[in-house]
Image: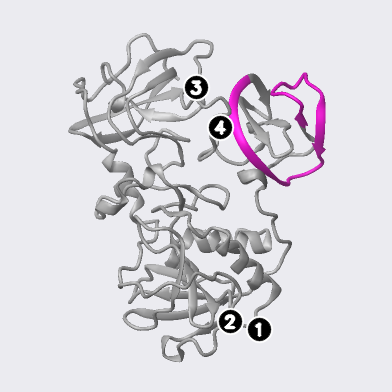
Amino acid sequence: MNSISTRRRTGGAILGASALALTAFFSAPAHAAPQAADATCGVLAPGASATAQAAVDAACSQIGVWYSWGGGHAATPGASYGYYDGSDPDSLHDGERKGFDCSGLMRYAYYRATGKDLLNGTADDQFHTSQAAARFSAGQGTAPLLPGDLMFWGSGHIHHVAMYLGNGQMVEAYESGTHIRVTSVRTGGDYAGAVRINGSGTPVPPPANGGTVFETWGTGVRTHRSPSVGSATVDTFPGPTQVSVQCQQHAETVTAEGYTNDAWAKLADGSWMTVIYIKGPAWLPGIPDCGGSSTPPPSGGSKAFQTWGTGVRTHSEPNVNAAVVDYFAQPTTVNVVCQKHAQEVTAEGYTNDAWSKLTDGSWMTNIYIKGPAWLDGVATC
């Protein structure tokens, strides 16, 4: 069976199936009325461990960054583009906002403090973490808390988390439409208590020049003066490490370790490395194109098509639950390498199981590509 629906139309909205599937994973914000904010973000009381102080510093470094529902939950901790939560109109533009949701910010802070991804998951996951050194009930209030302790809200299921700073203040990613901020603690309502994280390790340096930190893999990995394996070697990584990526672009195609990719990442020192050795999808999420173009150039055997709709996402696999690779705010041109039958998607009144593989290695449902449900002249992957 080649198609389920052969109809298209020329307008549309965000892929509903993707947003609905994600509601079970990402933390919902607390909706209690905020209290007056304090402009100071930092360690505001004595007694915290060096790790906790580093976590506070990391969280405070993100003051003013957007709250973005689902942000901070990419393959590597750090700000990332969020998703539209169909139940919250304020999140309509979260897919265009690179930032954090509440648990994504806590994950990033302790990753920066320890070099370990200790808190990957929702606020509820973090409340029940095995990394707890101490737990404090709601009835204890803030008296036993130290800077870096995580404060939680929710009755039965935890829906929000913030970081205590001391002196009755906390830093949080509050809700869609707001920015990361410092505010007075809220111990009323459904405040559920706090957790002290038992973390240790080597702090991760902040990204240089506005870059985003990613982890590499492999041994003997080289960086180059230009995006080509034939150019001069700048550095060699004997083992996995962290790199700060400034931007990425399509250049020389590289085949290594069973993967083929033409995406190269420009690092903080100006050198280049193939994205093959950077953990994450073939085209890194949230990283701009060095040339300023969001549409990859055609490569061998690809065919250009027009998309339709707004807020359309591409994924690392042909599945709406897979990691988001790119986000098309408006109709654009994509270059399709091949197509296959995979997860069945229903959106905009259409149902189709055909997915197209683009030149950056990402996938998008054929529903949002103008043409028949099974694209003419495109090979099967």
Circle 1: element type:
loop
Circle 3: element type:
loop
Q: Is residue 119 visible?
A: no
Near mark 1 (Cα within 10 A), the count class, few <14, some 14-19 or many ≥20, is: few
Q: What stretch is highlighted in magenta?
A: 223-251
Quadrant of the image containing the N terminus: top left
Work out whether 276 lies above or below 208: above
Nearest to viewer (mark 2 / mark 4):
2
For disc 4, the marked residue is: 282
For disc 1, the marked residue is: 47
Mark 2 and mark 4: span between their CA atoms? 41 Å
Name the spot of residue 317 as percent of width and height, x first. 45, 35
Q: Which mark is residue 34?
A: none
Q: Residue at x 49, y 10 (%)?
A: 301
Q: In the rendered structure, which amino acid carries the disc numbered 4?
A: Ala
For disc 3, the marked residue is: 296
Near mark 3 (Cα within 10 A), the count class, few <14, some 14-19 or many ≥20, is: some
Task: State if disc 1 and disc 4 touch (CB < 8 Å).
Answer: no
Mark 3 and mark 1: span between their CA atoms? 51 Å
Q: In the rendered structure, which amino acid carries the disc numbered 2?
A: Leu
Near mark 2 (Cα within 10 A), the count class, few <14, some 14-19 or many ≥20, is: many
For disc 2, the marked residue is: 146
Q: Residue at x 44, y 24 (%)?
A: 357
Q: In the rendered structure, which amino acid carries the disc numbered 1?
A: Gly
Q: Which residue is drawn at 49% across and 74% down?
A: 170
Mark 2 and mark 1: span between their CA atoms? 6 Å
Mark 2 and mark 3: span between their CA atoms? 48 Å
